[in-house]
Image (cartoon, rainbow, N blue to C red):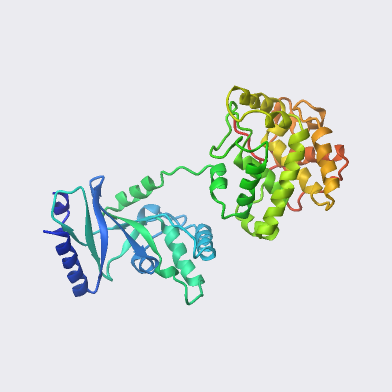
Amino acid sequence: MFFAEMGLTQHDSLTAAQQAASEAASASGGRSFTCVVFQQGGRLMLTTAFSNAFLINHVVAEPAAKGGNPRMATNRPMDTTHVRAISKYLVENERNYILPPVTLNVRSVPAIHVPRGNFATTVGFVVIGDETKFSVTDGQHRLAAISRAGGLLSDPDSTFMGDSVSVVIVVEPDLARIHQDFADAAQTKQIPASLLAAFNTREPLNRVLTKIVDGSALFHSRIDETSKSLSKNSPAVFLLNQVRGMVKELLFRDYALSESSIPARSNQVIGTTEQQDAFVERTLSMMEMLTTHMTPWQAIAELPTSGGPANQVVDFRKHYINMTATGLVIIGHVAYEIEKNPDPGWRTDQYLRLATKIDWRRDAEIWQGAIISGDKISTTRAPGRLAAKRVMAAIGLPAADVVEGAPQGAEPLLRVEM
């Protein structure tokens, strides 16, 4: 009954519905698309796939002007930076990309032919003419990026415009309800940074990160790779994103390097497989030396990864700097300077001194007035850099100047959320 009430044309068979849609498309100069027809929230919905070229020609974005009245437009203001980022991703990964489905709106029911029956969901055929225009409920930046990428791809053999995107079409004439649909569709949960680092192995930094975690006696099976914060009672030693901060220090001498800058910098430093393998090998060599000789890492490496004994990690985290994200960044900063020396024997000696000559307990004098004030640990850049200079001085390593142009005392090193 629902489909009949919505004005869909019903036929005695699927073949008859297909034939009628084909004839209607031929007569009107339109196109017939196979689709799934269903209801959701009392409204008619379709799902199908449109080619990139079709989307560019038939979808109209109506973004609100910044500073204007968004209620008079269909979409929120366009974020051009976001569009450029998506189009860059598409151009650089033309043969290996993925785009989530977009949600479109059409204000009047197009010609839809379905087989007769009291089905909640059915296959149908929708006829779309040249005059049919869709607005965007969710995905305007993806669609703008598709258009931009199509103009940037100069290869005449590119098949990009023939690629398709899955679409959900909502039949809805009411602008206020369209706005509400956009708000409802935006109820998504942000991916935790650790989980993103684990999944996004297209980025060279993340590829070496996972190899370091898997190859380290301290990190293997002891890193929380899915959470946003580390519970104070967690037996995990670190979040994956906290280890990533140490790796960023090792590579770039800047744990706070913006995510948008990382791809270009990564390609400069570890752009090839050979460079990545060499970096992983040297980092694992460093980790082996520190884990073998540094308190409490050496004790943790001997613990099982689960069960009662593993909970000793909780106590170690309360009492040692090198069990915090701040400590990891300090180690990465010092190691960056050590790695400048090409002599592996000299580097090994320096890491041995870093492991044995530094008192990593929170109440040690070396941390007081730098990252430790009272019973609290600072998570900002300037105290962390001061602590790193003290460590370098203690092991006889010249303290290099801080990164030129980097703002001081503003960015958190890596928040240790308990």
In the picture provided, is 371 more to the left or to the right than 241? right
In which image quadrant can residue 302 be found? Answer: top right
**Numbered disc total:** 0
Residue lying farthest bottom?
156
Q: Residue furthest top?
A: 308
Q: Residue at x 60, y 27 (%)?
A: 232
Q: Is residue 11 above or below residue 196?
A: below
Is 1 placed left or right of 293 in the picture? left
What residue is drawn where x is 56% and y is 40%? 225
Return the residue nearer the eye: 188 or 270.
270
Quadrant assignment, res 303: top right
Give the side of residue 127 with respect to residue 332, left or right.
left
Confirm whether residue 80 shows in the render. Answer: yes
**Picture residue at 78% right of the left edge, 31% below the top:** 367
Where does residue 403 sit, x and y in percent of width and height? 76, 51
Residue 77 relative to residue 206: left or right? left
- Expressed as whole percent of the image width and height from the top left, the position of residue 118 reads 14, 48
Q: Position of residue 150 (x, y in %)?
A: 46, 70
Where 378 falls versus 1 (above or below)?
A: above
Front-lying residue, 49 or 103: 49
> Residue drawn 66% across and 60% down?
272
Viewer-closest of 404 and 70: 404
In the rendered image, is residue 254 in sight? Answer: no
Could you tell me residue 170's position as x and y percent? 29, 54
Position of the C terminus, as image quadrant, is top right
- Can you name the residue that lies furthest to the left here? 12
Q: Nearer the viewer, residue 287 or 146?
A: 287
